[in-house]
Image: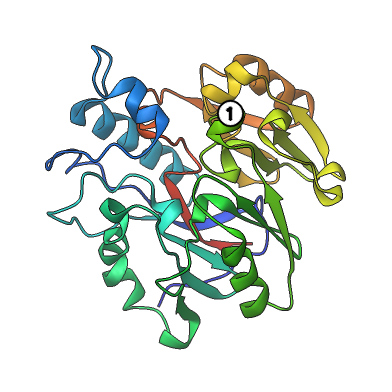
Amino acid sequence: MHKLCVTSETGRLRSVIIGYPDNFHQVPPAIINETQKQYYFGPDCPTRERIMAELDGFKQVLAGHGVEVLQPEPLDDVPDQLMTRDIGVVIGDTFVVTQMARASRRDEWLGLLPILDELNTQRIIKVPDEIVLEGGDVIVDNGRIFVGLSQRTGADGAAYLAHRFPQFEVIPVPLKQLADGENVLHLDCSFVPVGQRSALIYADGLAEVPEAIADYDLIEVTRAEQALLATNVLSLSPTQVIARRCASRVNAELRQRGLEVIELPFADPPKTGGSFRCCSLPLWRD
């Protein structure tokens, strides 16, 4: 039986579900975000072969650092199964099956059933159909749950978590919308804790910066770096993060704070809308 325990964004990672790449676009994609509009119809569109190679490199690095790596069961009728972060989140010792806004993604969680079947069913809850709550908008860190009010998740999603997890302080974080001139799909495209008490932030993507976020040692990310998803790193521990090689300035800032930055080539998954954090669903952190 898999252990469930996530109380921070940076505790040592022990077990994780990463994306399944082999069926990428075996059915026609549904265009559901601005990044896909930018890349899917041009000469630099993501390919199944490159995505498979880059996910395999990601998987090998995780396994090489002692992380148990799981992947969803392949499904025949979804455009891709890369962004496992969105379809579930572990809060404390409970697995929350989230609720996606777009119809093309609402069945992705079914690929997790073989893993969920090994869990104690009392530790699994499913967000009601009428509430949109996507995992990329949920950040659990040291007694707090930050919930992005985004292009996807609404205030009712934050209220649902506050009701279900009264032992946590739930902090709604309003994000700027497309109408505001910002393309911030989820909270983890603008804010992600790293290290001991640091965090990456694209402040212009937030409609306001809550006091609880201002408490972190903030590493500012530029608009161009946010477009590269430089915030969307995955912590292996309080001293190690996996990041895109192209985010060189941000990675240098992380190293200045004593972090080991493991840089990987990861060009094609971000063209679908997410990077390392989006492609991973932690089950167990120390």
Dot 1 crowding, Cα within 10 Å, few <14, some 14–19, many 20+: some
Q: Which quadrant would residue 203 be assigned to in this image? A: top right
**Residue 234 appearing in the image:** no
Q: Which amino acid type is shown beneath numbered disc 1?
A: Glu
Tell me which residue sits at (72%, 78%) in the image: 166
Count numbered badges in the picture: 1
Point out the image quarter for the N terminus.
bottom left
- Between 25 and 103, the one nearer to me in the picture: 103
Point out the image quarter for the C terminus.
bottom right
**Residue 84 appearing in the image:** yes
- Which residue ends up furthest to the top in the rendered image? 43
Tell me which residue sits at (26%, 51%) in the image: 104
Horizontal relation, residue 223 to residue 253: left or right: left
Residue 27's place in the image compared with 9, above or below, is above
Please name the residue that numbered disc 1 is placed on.
182
Rendering coords of residue 49 (x, y %)? 19, 28
Rendering coords of residue 246 (x, y %)? 52, 16
Rendering coords of residue 265 (x, y %)? 41, 22
Horizontal relation, residue 148 to residue 62: left or right: right
- Between 62 and 210, the one nearer to me in the picture: 210
Q: Which quadrant would residue 100 be assigned to in this image? A: bottom left
Rendering coords of residue 60 (x, y %)? 37, 39
Horizontal relation, residue 285 to residue 209: left or right: left
